[in-house]
């Protein structure tokens, strides 16, 4: 079994994708602790209740995490706002950046010293295709995931040679309750493909087991990631008509 005896922490491990990841890791012999506001469905997993959006709660969790030996940290928890940038509340902005970016950074900061001292470990950050293709009306979400992607790359370079791997995984849209009705309308208007949670969970676990660096899920989205990095104006033109249609949702 690929994860036999490994101690793994998963933020957001009680959610639709997280629950499937936890189940797969447990089946492969891991000792899994779920970090979430809700208890995991699988009774085999340990549970550490926490609120990643609360600065005091995050610091308390970071202290606990830093005191224990972890083989793998999976930063999966996330939130999303969909709509015009000017309509997003300050609280939503703080929540999005806090959960999607600050919490993964702080928890990685907490566990990295122990991993480095033991000469082994893995920090896994679950981002999004939206962190590389920055869609209109997802400004704060795309920004937070773009930041997570940059953090993953910087941390990987910093930990190079230490035995600690940093894996960044970017799924495309997934069919979960995470999506609001308007997000589903967006997907229909833009003909955006959406993957099943089980498929995404399997791909994530495979990438973790292989200790891959960067993984982008979905075609043609993975191609557009590379195009957007080199020819953003080309992607602007490709998305322009769809952006105009989607803007009508907020007219």
Image (spheres, grey):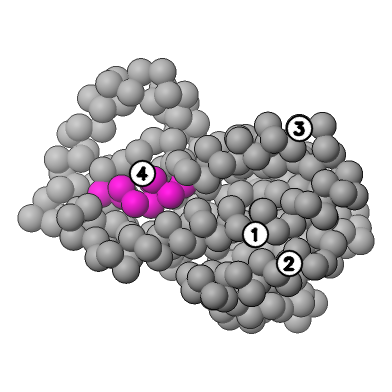
**Residue at x 59%, y 53% (from the top left corner):** 105
**Residue at x 78%, y 52% (from the top left corner):** 113
In this rendering, the answer to whether 25 lies above or below 37 is above
Question: Where residue 62 sits: x, y (%)?
Answer: 66, 66
Cα–Cα gap, marks 4 and 2: 38 Å
Cα–Cα gap, marks 2 and 3: 22 Å
The residue where tag 1 is placed is 107
Q: Are marks 4 and 1 in contact (CB under 8 Å)?
A: no
The residue where tag 3 is placed is 160
Q: Is residue 224 left or right of residue 238?
A: right
Query: Closer to the N terminus: mark 4 or mark 2?
Result: 2
Cα–Cα gap, marks 1 and 2: 7 Å
Q: Is residue 223 left or right of residue 151?
A: left
Q: Are marks 1 and 2 in contact (CB under 8 Å)?
A: yes
Q: Nearer the viewer, residue 50 or 129?
A: 50
**Image quadrant for the N terminus?**
bottom right
Q: Which class describes the residues within 10 Å of circle 4: few (<14), some (14-19), or many (20+)?
A: few
Question: Where residue 17 sits: x, y (%)?
Answer: 58, 62
Query: Closer to the N terminus: mark 4 or mark 1?
Result: 1
Q: Give the magenta range.
A: 137-145
The residue where tag 2 is placed is 65
Query: Closer to the N terminus: mark 1 or mark 2?
Result: 2
Cα–Cα gap, marks 3 and 4: 36 Å
Q: Are marks 4 and 2 in contact (CB under 8 Å)?
A: no
Most frequent secondary structure within the magenta stretch:
helix
Outermost residue, left direction? 251
Q: Which class describes the residues within 10 Å of circle 3: few (<14), some (14-19), or many (20+)?
A: few
Is 142 inside the magenta-drawn segment?
yes
Is 196 inside the magenta-drawn segment?
no
The residue where tag 4 is placed is 192
**Image quadrant for the C terminus?**
bottom left
Query: Closer to the N terminus: mark 2 or mark 3?
Result: 2
């Amino acid at each position: 079994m690929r994860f036999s005896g490994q101690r793994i922490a998963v933020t957001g491990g009680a959610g639709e994708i997280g629950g499937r990841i936890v189940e797969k890791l447990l089946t492969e012999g891991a000792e899994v602790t779920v970090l979430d506001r809700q208890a995991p469905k699988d009774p085999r997993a340990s549970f550490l209740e926490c609120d990643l959006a609360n600065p005091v709660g995050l610091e308390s969790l970071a202290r606990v995490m830093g005191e224990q030996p972890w083989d793998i940290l999976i930063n999966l928890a996330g939130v999303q706002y969909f709509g015009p940038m000017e309509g997003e509340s300050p609280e939503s902005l703080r929540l999005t950046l806090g959960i999607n970016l600050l919490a993964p950074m702080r928890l990685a900061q907490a566990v990295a010293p122990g991993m480095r001292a033991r000469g082994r470990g893995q920090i896994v950050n679950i981002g999004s295709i939206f962190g590389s293709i920055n869609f209109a009306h997802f400004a704060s979400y795309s920004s937070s995931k773009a930041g997570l992607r940059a953090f993953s790359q910087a941390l990987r370079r910093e930990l190079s040679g230490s035995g600690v791997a940093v894996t960044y995984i970017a799924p495309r849209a997934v069919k979960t309750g995470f999506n609001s009705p308007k997000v589903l309308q967006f997907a229909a208007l833009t003909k955006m493909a959406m993957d099943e949670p089980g498929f995404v969970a399997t791909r994530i676990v495979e990438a973790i087991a292989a200790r891959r660096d960067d993984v982008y899920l979905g075609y043609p989205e993975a191609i557009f990631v590379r195009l957007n990095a080199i020819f953003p104006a080309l992607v602007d033109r490709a998305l322009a008509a769809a952006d105009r249609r989607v803007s009508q949702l907020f007219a």
